[in-house]
Image (tube, grey):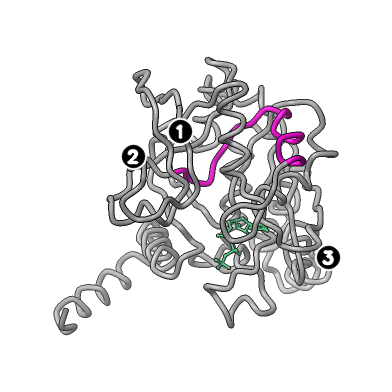
Amino acid sequence: MSSPDTKAAKLIRKCVIPAAGLGTRFLPATKAVPKEMLPIVDTPTLQYIVEEAVAAGIEDVVVINGRGKSSIEDHFDIGFELETTMRARGKTAEADKLRAIANLVRIVSIRQKEPLGLGHAVLCAKSVIGNEPFGVLLGDDMIDAEEPGIGQLARVYQQHQKAVIALMEVPDSETHMYGIAAGKDLGNGVIQIDHVVEKPKKGTAPSNLAVIGRYVLPPSIFPILENQTTGVGGEIQLTDGLATLQKTEGLLGYKFQGQRYDAGDKVGYLKANIAYALKRPDLRGGLLEYMREVVKTEKP
Ligand code: UTP
C-alpha cells in the first residue's frame, strides 16, 4: 500500500537529474569518472538520488550526462557478464542486488554536449518531460530524510499548484556560495518567494535561505530557459530562470525536513561517507573506534 506522501508525489511522474558538470572540485578522480558516480560508502551518489525519486513515486528519470558519462548508463543497466559470473560462483544474493539496480525505474539518458550550466542541463530534458510538472534532483546533492526530499516538494506543489524549490538556512558567511531566496513565511515551512538571486556578493544576500538541489517545476520553465541569456560564470543559470518564473507565475520555497549533504564538495562528501557508514551495522563499530582514536591523537 502506498503512503499518502507517495500518492502526493504521483502528480509528479517524471524527474530530471543533471549530472553533466565537469566536477572540477574532484579532479583528478573525475577525469574519467563522473562526480555523481563517486561512492558514498559503496554506492554511487547518483544511485541514492535515483532511489529517492523512486521512493517518491517517480516513474521516469531523465539523467543529463556529458563527456565520459557512459558509466552512469552502465550502472543502471543489466551487467550481464558480472551477474552471470557471480551466480556461477554462488553469489546469488549479490547478483540479485545488482539486478535490482537495473530494475529500479525507467531511465532515459540525454547528453548535454557542453556544460553550459544547470539551466541549460534542465532544458536538455524538454522533449522527454513534455507538458507536465516535473522534479529536478541535482546529481551531487543528497537528502537523507524519512519522507523523500523530492516527495516533500511534490506534496507542497500539489497543495499550492505552484513551482516549489527546496530551501535550507545557511550561516551569513556562506550565502555567497548559493542561490539565495527571500519572501513571506506562509507557515508549515512554506515561503512565498519574492526574491531569488544566484551567488550574491558577500554582504548583499536578501536572506540566509539557500536554494538546495531539489525543485518541482512547471513545464513553463522551458521557454523561460530557452530565452535566457548567460548569468554568473557565463552559464545558463537555473536560478535566473526561477527569478523569471517567480515574477510571471509565482514561486514557493520549502524548508524541507532532513539532513542534506553536498557531495559535490570535498568536506560534504566526506561527511556523507561518515554519516552513511555510521548507519551500517557492519561498519559502525570499526569506524567509531577509529574516530575516537583520531579525536584523541589529532591536534586541532
Ligand atoms: P555543480 O556546479 O555542482 O557541478 O552543478 P560542476 O560544475 O560539475 O562542479 P565543479 O564546481 O566543477 O566541481 C550541480 C549539478 O548540476 C550538474 C552537475 O553535474 C551537478 O550534478 N550540471 C552542472 C550539469 O549537468 N550541467 C552543467 O552544465 C552544469
In percent of width and height, residue 46 lies at: 61, 56
- Which callout, 3 or 1, points at the residue further toward the start of the chain? 3
223 drawn magenta: yes
Q: Amino acid at mark 1?
A: His
- On screen, residue 129 versus residue 3, left or right, reads right
Depth order, front residue of 230/260: 230
Q: Amino acid at mark 3?
A: Phe
Residue 15 sits in which quadrant?
A: top right
SS class, disc 3: helix
Name the mark on residue 207: 2
In percent of width and height, residue 103 lies at: 75, 48
Note whether 30 is above or below 190 in the view shown. Answer: below
Q: Amino acid at mark 2?
A: Ser
Q: Disc 1 and disc 2: Cα gap in Å?
A: 9 Å
Dots 3 and 1: beta carbons under 8 Å?
A: no
- Which callout, 1 or 2, points at the residue further toward the start of the chain? 1
Q: Report the residue at 58% width, 69% height from top.
A: 38
Name the mark on residue 80: 3
- On screen, residue 136 versus residue 63, left or right, reads left
- Which callout, 3 or 2, points at the residue further toward the start of the chain? 3
| Mark 3: few/some/many CA within 10 Å (<14, 14-19, 20+) | few
Residue 246 sits in which quadrant?
A: top right
Q: Disc 3 and disc 2: Cα gap in Å?
A: 51 Å
> Which image quarter is the N terminus in?
top right
SS class, disc 1: strand
In percent of width and height, residue 173 lies at: 29, 56
Q: Which residues are magenta?
A: 211-227
